[in-house]
Image (spheres, rainbow, N blue to C red):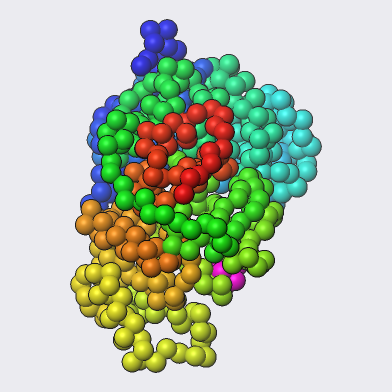
Amino acid sequence: MAADSAPPPVVRMRGISVEFPGVKALDEVDFTLRGGEVHTLMGENGAGKSTLIKALTGVYGITAGEISVSGTPRVFRSTADAEAAGISTVYQEVNLCANLSVGENVMLGHEKRRFGRIDWRATHREAETHLANLGLALDTRSLLSSHSIAVQQLVAISRAMVTDATVLVLDEPTSSLDRGEVEQLFGVIRDLRDRGVAILFVTHFLDQVYEISDRLTVLRNGRLVGEYLAKDLPRGELISLMIGRQLDELDAISRSADREIDRTGTPVLRATELGRKGVLEPADLDVYDGEVVGIAGLLGSGRTELVRLLYGADRPDSGRIEVRGRHARITAPRHAIDRRIAFSSEDRRAEGIVGELTVAENIILGIQAKRGALRPVRRAERDAIVDEYIAALGVRPADPNALVRNLSGGNQQKVLLARWLATAPQLIILDEPTRGIDVGAKADIQRKVAELSERGLAVVFISSELEEVLRIAQRVAVMRDRRKIGELASHDTEVGTLVDFIAQESPESAEHVA
């Protein structure tokens, strides 16, 4: 917890609640940000991190609570109100104008004027000064687009500091940077911290959390878990606080993933050194017939990035994929579909279901896409397929003409699973298939995955719930900071062991045991 020698608070948020129709995104959260300190906000997806930041920066109004800056109560009705209070924000997606020069971006809205007109010479001199304050020597007249993402991030920070901000919010600033670029950014952050700026940092990279943070605040399900000094909070304990269970509770979970898998033959899919610069370090992965391979790691660890490369949703720039021993060029989803590989995205609303279509139309989409527009699925065939999967997956209501948008989240997920199963895949990739659904629907999907694998289907399964991964998968590939750090066999791995493996500083790759 906070030490007696803690720097004075710059921001105090007390009893902050934010509500949307039917959803309480923040529930009486307290948060304190101090000058001369890097304070990292931690929590899994949906914990409330983004909502808290948006409440602080004027994007969202608060339902209850109070915010004070440097001891003065504040009401932020817009981002301009927050900026006027000395709070500047740099987002994950750099909010700059790539078609303008570096200097124009740094000074945007704060240009030097003379006789009512912009004095560009003076403006660029001022931009040079602000960049130099961050240790940057850039040609201010060069186009921003000619520079790397890392340099653009630093330009965004320079722009944020033009107003002499006392609070700097950095939301996932390292998500697209390589190790050298992260070091450059951290040098700038440390310099600002040493000058007394209060820095609120958000990242999913565990190593970076401990490298740069002085203090941590953990949120879970929209509520405050606690505030901690980074040096006093072990990694394993941090993960337990984020996922909401103590290790001894997690260790008691029973599993049914002890089935033997024959790995002596050719795998359904083999990825070797598959990677993409700034997105995922080269990784290997094999999946065999009838096997469920789980992918475990915290949000942002590279789980989704890996499977999107496997499916061709993103294009790799290194590595090789083989399907049943033959080289497969998978650089687009249609290439994967042609090889009977299906992918259910974690964002079922944006990349899965089509809410304006019926249950039947959603289920049949995969087959129709595979056949093409010139070979429509006949009505009798369509009805037979839809009825089969509505019954097999227990979709409720069992009405093929119901609009999918009117179904519960769990039933929408069942419809999405039905769509891909109807294409008769040999491998299906399921990214967070049980997130945000009720316990009953979750159990239904888990049972269906186990049943399908027993029939010989190969499955790649991602879940933020570690016990779910171990319960379903025979083997677990462990990810951290966008690299694969090893594999564990589920039948002799407890959740506590998996948490420790994710958390340790330099884990050695573990051999999996069938």
Residue 55 lies left or right of residue 326; in this view the side is: left
Q: At x 36% / y 76%, what residue is drawn? A: 363
The answer to whether 400 is drawn above or below residue 60 in the figure is below
Report x, y in % for residue 143. 75, 47
Along the viewing direction, whichever of 113 and 208 lies nearer the viewer: 208
Q: At x 39% / y 79%, what residue is drawn? A: 364
Along the viewing direction, whichever of 338 and 196 lies nearer the viewer: 338
Q: At x 54% / y 27%, what residue is drawn? A: 505
Q: Determine the main secondary structure of the stretch shown in magenta.
A: helix
Q: Is residue 203 located in the magenta-colored stretch of the structure?
A: no
Report x, y in % for residue 411. 27, 65
Residue 185 lies left or right of residue 165; in this view the side is: right
Residue 370 lies left or right of residue 279; in this view the side is: left
Report x, y in % for residue 115. 70, 37
The answer to whether 9 is drawn above or below residue 315 in the figure is above
Q: At x 40% / y 52%, what residue is drawn? A: 473
Magenta range is 332-336
Residue 129 shows in this picture: no
The answer to whether 195 is drawn above or below residue 67 in the figure is above
Residue 257 shows in this picture: yes
Along the viewing direction, whichever of 330 and 401 lies nearer the viewer: 330
Q: Quadrant of the N terminus?
A: top left
